[in-house]
Image (spheres, rainbow, N blue to C red):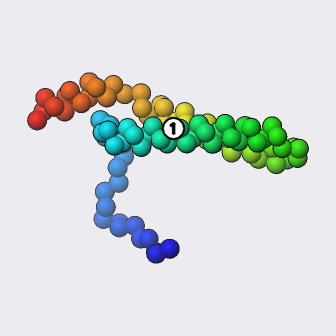
Amino acid sequence: MPNQTIDQNEPVMTHGPQVITTKDYLYLKDQLSWELLAMKKCSHFAKECSDPEIAAAIDRVGQMHLRHYEMLLKHLKNDNDAEMKRVQQLQ
């Protein structure tokens, strides 16, 4: 793996864009699906596990994926159609 360095001169984004492109939407849709699937798998395998300590660890991982899913949904609560119309009017 090559060494990755962070350019100190690059600006840091403090918030996301006002609109979501089609490519962004498709990526986010995939990410939501992956988080939900991971959460469901963790729930299933935690129930199947006979060692309570391992089951608890798997359950914690599932809860992490659920938090990630909910966080993505929270960020998506934006009226993208209205924002896209505003962008088109500015052009």
Numbered-mark total: 1
Give whichever of 43, 83 is nearer the camera: 43
Residue visible at 26% across and 24% down in the picture: 82
| Image coords of residue 40 (percent x, y) | 66, 36
Answer left or right for 43 relative to 48. left
**From this viewpoint, which residue is outermost toward the left?**
91
Residue 59: quadrant of the picture: top right
Residue visible at 51% across and 38% down in the picture: 32
Answer left or right for 15 relative to 2. left
Answer left or right for 86 relative to 54. left
| Image coords of residue 57 (percent x, y) | 76, 47
Residue visible at 41% across and 27% down in the picture: 77
| Image coords of residue 51 (percent x, y) | 88, 47
Q: Quadrant of the C terminus?
A: top left
Residue visible at 33% across and 25% down in the picture: 79
| Image coords of residue 48 (percent x, y) | 82, 40
Answer left or right for 54 relative to 40. right
Q: Of helix, strand and loop, which one carries label 1? A: helix
Residue 81: quadrant of the picture: top left
Q: Does residue 67 appear anywhere in the picture?
A: no
Indicate the amino acid at tag 1.
Leu
> Dot 1 corresponds to which residue?
32
